[in-house]
């Protein structure tokens, strides 16, 4: 099983295979974390040996045997086998040999050590379950031109990096972080919960004020968040939905941007639509995802589009230009650590939020373009 | 086994229904009706009404959580996680547990579910793991009876129309505490054979249909996705113990060439198993033997013996297995013949309905009408006793496969499923 | 049997016989005609069957070749197809059975029994046939049992696997044969299945012996089978062996229903019977009319003859025709007239003879006592002057008185005979009368005569006049004793006889001649030296008055037996004729 890849052109494996591979990757990472807590396995072996000894008569002596039918790494298996054999040998005594076969098996909860004590009168079974701790998060693969801004458990909707602070809009509300002693400390938080499936939100800052757009509600607050936000119903995002509705000719959509006289629209049909100045449809693209952001740098605006995947595979972001109502790729795609949950223009670049498939946390990235490459 | 574990953990993932925000590069679209067809004919989703038909019970267990939720739910690893209960504490004597319930949980009629004091007290001196396991079981789902007698739940969907055994429509619960589902509704056509389901899928009448386990490996049709989920099935021989002597039962089991059936008939889908519960659930299924021993079988039944053999002839997966078993049995001198009335031995499907051995065994003992599981004994001991008392000999574990149109996303977490109409061909 | 009846029978038999002959001849001709037609039809059926079988065999060969050369078969042989893919190939090729097997006959895929993959093919095919290009009959094992099929084996194109395929030998094969109405074809297939156009035959064991004949001799055989108790269910079969390489593969049975033939024969018979019966009726009527004209006069003649035989010589026959019958009647009438005259003359003569005999007997009887009377009177006349006249006078008067007494006795007997009284009937036991008579007659010692009584124990009570019976029996006993002067056995028997009683008196004397027997009952006839000859006449008179019969049997030296049969009851003299008392 290969670890999560960093750079590289986005492949398009068949979804079925991709799902299995991704899950396998995730599982392996889980197991790697488990290996960090090796004494759990030892405890399990010791507990099993104790149970086995309790089942032996005084005149019986264990003759251990082992087999592995699990995905436990070979090193762990060997360690377990040696420990088990030693534990039984320590018990000693008896002249009548009894075969004791330890099988390392597993189930969805973890691993199972099963001992079959094969007396002449019949076989007795003892079991011990144990679980390995999740592995440490692996070193993140580098993202070209992406920079991790913030990571947290609660889903991040948007993020704004200010000169001296950072505002993080998430499903719980808006939080203000200030950098102290090299790390971000949360100094203020206002609760503006979003209870919507596939929650969305947008944070716009303008000087000292910040405007929060969430489904069905728009709030304004100072960037210092000294006062309670002023909220009113309505706004860009449709209530209890994940779509935007600006109450104009566009009706409902996921994302929209003006490119010159053209309008780019990520429709609820999952396609990217291009309309001209007269709002006449000019082109439709499939498979480009529902999020895009305009990046003005390097002769842009270029369109950063998250490649369509699914919840179990990492997304990639690539740049495109609109040429004659056609999207033309202008950069290599970069792969993030998981599916993209938000993509907003931010200054000359963009902000992307992705859910880390291995940790389950939400990570916000700043995307900038290195024009020299 | 490693592959199996991963495969089944992948399947196990599918049962997880955490209220994590769903993410994809393609934003899910709200709206639409998911059209599902199933073989089972479910009489009711009432958690208290346990079906006696194995197929229906498995389906009931799959669909019931959409309407009626439990205080805790099992995650991908079978661990209880907070659900309608957010936390739990016990008294000093550890004889009473108090479960704090989630706030602002709305019932299907819009009223707020609010147990007195915002908590539920359960006097129980057993280990918390056992209590949580039971609370995660379908039988412990929260059901509120309305004044008109209707059953109200808290799940992401509510029952808008129920034609028992035939069809049902579940509509999104707009005020679901975990966020309104993407789908507007789910229509379920019940009692449809696999052939009819396939036919409906071909002509676009259904978005999700069941397929036989062996077809999980078949080349996909354009615009389809194949997935497998819990519940899964145990294919087993069930004997009428009163009529079939123990040596004959044993001989029949020993005569079956499970490997051929698995390789050829099942196309290596599922697993050969001598245990009721799959290894990915218990880790000890290898303790139950499943090898063929024709010599021993002939020794156990020295003279020709005849048994009446029953199986569901409409089940396209079961029928070829049954025919093959009849051929295998004839080598051991046992004739399996069709008969009228109750059969001496039946080839049946038993569902594995939960990601927890106890809960799964509970449903199986209810189906087989044998003594319930003993909480004091281990799952292994319970399973061993159950097989001995019920006259059941497991043969295979089969996944339940689904064929999905390409517009169906995030199957099978129904609250997260959405229909990508842009992907329609 | 009367002449009329005989005539009727004869005429009826003649008609019936003629009809029977014609009916029989027609039946035989009919049967032969049917047999001939059946033979032709069966031959035609056999030829048709052979052609049909050959055509189907070619078809099976073609289909199996098609299956063997198909891409699907190659995929199966290469292990690149589903285990039940043979079903698709079988359906495409139009075969009922298809097995794709390895060279060692391990089944790779089976169309009709998919579950047998991996097992050895167990069709009943000879090892050499696996590499033969023939089409043959084979027994195929299926989940529902064994069936017969036309089978061919072909190698899979480009591979080592073999395709064994076949089509069921179904009743449809027989149905496709164009059989004439009333005919059918059956097929016997080993080990014991018999199929017809409508499916398996329900009662095949009735064909067992016919089939066994063919199996034993390997030649055709014929036979008839009656399927039910109704004869019209009979069927005639021609059975032919179907062989392949000298081995019997089956038996074809061409059957013809005999119901039509039997129906026709029955119809012929029925017609014959109707015609015969009608003929008999007509014959009877005709005969009756004919005989009426012939037998009635004959019957009248016969009645007249009976009357004459019964003693009525005045019987006459009416003459109604002038033919032979009329002549016969006339002759009869003349005969009876002559008989009457002769009888009258005979009676007259009998009377004269009887009077002459009576006169002779009277003269004889009277002469005896008259001679001593005359001598005595002459003695008296001579001794009137002599001294012994008183003595002579006393002796002579004594002699005169004795002889006069004898005369009186003789005359008394004649008087008795002349005026015998009418019997007075009463119920008596004949045995009692016998005992009383025997007692009376054996009161005196008869040293040489031994009486023997054999009397019946019952059935001896009759209506009779006991006095007359005693008198008659007494006469017989006296006669019997008189017939045994030297001694002997006097046997008296009684026994029930008919509805009365039989009394027999037997002596062991010297017997009587035949002439004596005939004249025995003539009054005054006697064989005794003395006697009036009236005794037996009296006996006969008594018997006659009792409506009985008397007979005598005797032989020289064998004794004589008189047998009297008396009825048990007597007619009431006051009742109309025909009634009895």
Image: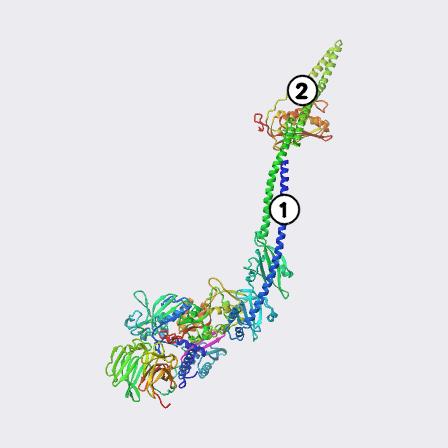
The location of residue C63, given as percent across then percent down, is 55, 69
Task: Determine the secondary structure under disc 1.
Answer: helix
The location of residue C418, given as percent across then percent down, is 65, 20
Residue A203 falls inside the magenta stretch: no
Comparing C449 with C263, the one in front is: C263
Q: Nearer the viewer, mark 2 or mark 1?
A: 1
Comparing A149 with B306, the one in front is: A149
Which residue range is magenta in the image? Answer: A112-131
What's the colour scheme? Answer: rainbow
Give the letter of the chain under mark 1: C
The location of residue A101, given as percent across then percent down, is 47, 78
Q: Is disc 2 in contact with disc 1, using a CB cutoff of under 8 Å?
A: no
Task: Determine the secondary structure under disc 2.
Answer: helix
Rendered view: C230 above or below B146: above
Rendered view: C205 above or below B257: above
Give the number of the disc on residue B48.
Answer: none
Q: Which residue is rendered at x = 63% and y = 22% of the image? A: C420
Q: Which residue is rendered at x = 60% and y = 47% of the image? A: C269
- Does the rendering let one see residue C512? no
Please identify the residue farthest to the front as the structure is shown.
Answer: A278
Give the letter of the chain under mark 2: C
The earlier-in-sequence mark between 2 and 1 is: 1
Residue A116 falls inside the magenta stretch: yes
The location of residue A306, given as percent across then percent down, is 36, 82
- From the image, tell me which residue sits under label 2: C414
Give the number of the disc on residue C22.
Answer: 1
């Amino acid at each position: 099983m290969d670890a999560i890849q960093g750079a590289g052109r986005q492949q398009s494996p068949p979804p079925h295979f991709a799902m299995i591979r991704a899950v396998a990757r995730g599982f392996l990472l889980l197991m790697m974390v488990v290996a960090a807590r090796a004494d759990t396995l030892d405890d399990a072996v010791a507990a099993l040996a104790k149970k086995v000894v309790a089942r032996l008569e005084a005149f019986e002596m264990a003759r251990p045997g082992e087999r592995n039918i699990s995905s436990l790494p070979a090193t762990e298996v060997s360690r377990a086998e040696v420990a088990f054999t030693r534990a039984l040998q320590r018990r000693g005594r008896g002249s009548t040999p009894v075969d004791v076969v330890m099988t390392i098996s597993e189930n969805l909860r973890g691993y199972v050590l099963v001992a079959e004590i094969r007396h002449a009168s019949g076989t007795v079974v003892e079991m011990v379950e144990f679980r390995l701790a999740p592995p440490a998060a692996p070193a993140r693969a580098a993202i070209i031109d992406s920079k991790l801004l913030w990571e947290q458990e609660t889903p991040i909707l948007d993020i704004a990096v200010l000169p001296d602070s950072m505002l993080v809009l998430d499903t719980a509300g808006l939080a203000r972080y200030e950098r102290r002693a090299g790390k971000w400390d949360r100094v203020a938080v206002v609760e503006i919960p979003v209870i919507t499936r596939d929650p969305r939100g947008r944070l716009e800052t303008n000087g000292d004020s910040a405007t929060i757009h969430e489904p069905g509600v728009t709030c304004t607050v100072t960037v210092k968040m000294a006062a309670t936000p002023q909220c009113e119903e309505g706004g860009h995002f449709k209530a209890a939905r994940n779509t935007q509705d600006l109450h104009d000719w566009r009706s409902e959509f996921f994302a929209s941007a003006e490119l010159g006289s053209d309008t780019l629209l990520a429709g609820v049909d999952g396609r990217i639509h291009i309309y001209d100045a007269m709002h006449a449809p000019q082109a439709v693209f499939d498979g480009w995802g529902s999020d895009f952001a305009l990046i003005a740098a390097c002769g842009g605006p270029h369109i950063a589009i998250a490649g369509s995947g699914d919840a179990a595979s990492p997304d990639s972001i690539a740049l495109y230009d609109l040429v004659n109502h056609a999207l033309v790729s202008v950069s290599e795609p970069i792969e993030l650590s998981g599916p993209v949950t938000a993509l907003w223009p931010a200054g000359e670049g963009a902000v992307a939020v992705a859910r880390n498939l291995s940790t389950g946390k939400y990570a916000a990235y700043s995307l900038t373009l290195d024009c020299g490459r | 086994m490693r592959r199996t574990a991963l495969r089944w953990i992948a399947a196990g993932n599918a049962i997880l229904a955490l209220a994590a925000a769903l993410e994809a590069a393609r934003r899910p679209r709200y709206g639409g009706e998911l059209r599902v067809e199933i073989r089972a004919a479910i009489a009711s989703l009432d958690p208290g009404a346990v079906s006696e038909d194995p197929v229906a019970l498995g389906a009931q267990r799959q669909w019931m959580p959409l309407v009626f939720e439990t205080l805790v739910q099992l995650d991908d690893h079978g661990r209880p996680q907070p659900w309608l209960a957010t936390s739990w504490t016990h008294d000093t004597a550890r004889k009473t547990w108090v479960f704090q319930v989630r706030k602002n949980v709305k019932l299907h009629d819009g009223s707020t579910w609010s147990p007195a004091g915002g908590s539920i007290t359960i006097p129980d001196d057993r280990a918390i793991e056992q209590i949580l396991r039971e609370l995660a079981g379908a039988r412990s789902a929260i059901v509120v009876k309305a004044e008109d007698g209707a059953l109200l739940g808290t799940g992401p969907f509510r029952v808008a129309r129920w034609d028992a055994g035939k069809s049902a429509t579940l509509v999104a619960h707009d005020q679901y505490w975990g966020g309104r589902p993407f789908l507007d509704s789910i229509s379920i056509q019940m009692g449809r054979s696999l052939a009819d389901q396939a036919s409906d899928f071909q002509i676009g009448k259904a978005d999700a249909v069941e397929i036989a386990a062996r077809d999980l490996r078949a080349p996909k049709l354009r615009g389809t996705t194949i997935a497998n989920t819990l519940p899964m099935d145990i294919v087993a021989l069930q004997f009428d113990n009163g009529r079939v002597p123990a040596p004959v039962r044993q001989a029949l089991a020993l005569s079956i060439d499970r490997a051929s059936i698995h390789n050829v008939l099942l196309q290596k889908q599922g697993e050969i198993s001598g245990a009721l519960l799959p290894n990915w659930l218990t880790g000890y299924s290898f303790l139950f033997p499943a090898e063929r021993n024709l010599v021993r079988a002939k020794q156990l039944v020295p003279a020709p013996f005849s048994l009446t053999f029953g199986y569901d002839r409409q089940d396209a997966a079961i029928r070829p297995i049954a025919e093959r078993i009849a051929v295998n049995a004839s080598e051991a001198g046992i004739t399996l013949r069709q008969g009228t009335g109750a059969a001496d031995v039946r080839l049946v499907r038993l569902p594995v309905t939960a990601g927890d051995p106890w809960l799964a065994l509970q449903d199986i003992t209810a189906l087989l009408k044998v003594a319930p599981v003993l909480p004091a004994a281990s799952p292994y001991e319970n399973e061993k006793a159950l097989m001995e008392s019920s006259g059941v000999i497991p043969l295979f574990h089969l996944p339940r496969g689904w064929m999905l149109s390409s517009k169906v996303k995030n199957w099978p977490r129904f609250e997260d499923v959405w229909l990508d109409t842009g992907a329609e061909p | 049997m009367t002449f009329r009846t005989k005539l009727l029978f004869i005429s009826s038999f003649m008609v019936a016989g003629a009809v029977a002959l014609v009916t029989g001849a027609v039946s035989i001709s009919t049967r032969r005609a049917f047999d001939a037609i059946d033979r032709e039809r069966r031959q035609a059926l056999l030829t048709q069957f052979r052609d049909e079988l050959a055509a189907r065999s070619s078809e099976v060969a073609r289909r199996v070749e098609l299956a063997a050369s198909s891409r699907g078969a190659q995929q199966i042989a290469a292990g690149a197809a589903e285990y039940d893919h043979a079903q698709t190939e079988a359906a495409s090729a139009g075969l009922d059975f298809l097995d794709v097997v390895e060279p060692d006959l391990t089944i790779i895929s089976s169309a009709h029994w998919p579950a047998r993959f991996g097992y050895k093919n167990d069709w009943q095919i000879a090892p050499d046939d696996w590499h033969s290009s023939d089409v043959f009959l084979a027994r195929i094992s299926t989940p529902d049992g064994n069936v017969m099929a036309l089978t061919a084996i072909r190698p899979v194109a480009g591979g080592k696997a073999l395709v064994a395929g076949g089509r069921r030998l179904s009743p449809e094969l027989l149905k496709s044969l164009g059989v004439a109405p009333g005919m059918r074809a059956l097929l016997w297939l080993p080990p014991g299945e018999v199929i017809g156009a409508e499916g398996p035959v329900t009662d095949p064991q009735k064909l067992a012996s016919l089939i066994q004949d063919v199996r034993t001799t390997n030649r055709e055989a014929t036979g008839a089978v009656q399927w039910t108790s109704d004869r019209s269910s009979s069927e005639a079969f021609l059975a032919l062996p179907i062989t392949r390489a000298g081995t019997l593969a089956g038996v074809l049975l061409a059957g013809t229903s005999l119901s039509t033939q039997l129906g026709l024969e029955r119809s012929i018979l029925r017609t014959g019977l109707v015609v015969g019966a009608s003929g008999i009726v007509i014959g009877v009527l005709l005969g009756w009319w004919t005989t009426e004209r012939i037998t009635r006069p004959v019957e009248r003649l016969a009645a007249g003859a009976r009357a004459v035989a019964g003693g009525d010589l005045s019987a006459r026959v009416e003459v109604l025709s002038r033919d032979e019958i009329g002549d016969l009647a006339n002759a009869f009438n003349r005969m009876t007239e002559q008989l009457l005259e002769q009888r009258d003359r005979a009676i007259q003569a009998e009377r004269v003879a009887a009077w002459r005999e009576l006169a002779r007997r009277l003269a004889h009887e009277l002469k005896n006592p008259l001679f001593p009377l005359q001598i005595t009177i002459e003695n008296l006349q001579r001794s009137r002057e002599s001294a012994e006249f008183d003595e002579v006078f006393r002796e002579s008067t004594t002699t005169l008185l004795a002889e006069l007494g004898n005369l009186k006795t003789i005359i008394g007997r004649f008087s008795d005979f002349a005026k015998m009284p009418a019997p007075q009937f009463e119920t008596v036991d004949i045995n009692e009368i016998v005992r009383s008579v025997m007692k009376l007659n054996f009161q005196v010692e008869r040293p040489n005569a031994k009486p023997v009584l054999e009397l019946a124990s019952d059935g001896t009570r009759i209506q009779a006049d006991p006095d007359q019976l005693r008198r008659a029996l007494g006469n017989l006993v006296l006669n019997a004793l008189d017939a045994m002067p030297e001694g002997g056995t006097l046997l008296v028997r009684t026994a029930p006889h008919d509805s009365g009683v039989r009394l027999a008196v037997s002596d062991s004397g010297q017997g009587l001649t035949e002439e004596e027997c005939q004249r025995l009952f003539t009054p005054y006839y006697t064989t005794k030296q003395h006697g009036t000859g009236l005794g037996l006449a009296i006996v006969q008179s008594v018997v006659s008055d009792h409506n009985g019969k008397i007979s005598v049997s005797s032989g020289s030296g064998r004794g004589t037996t008189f047998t009297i049969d008396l009825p048990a009851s007597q007619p009431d003299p006051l009742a109309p004729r025909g009634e009895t008392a």
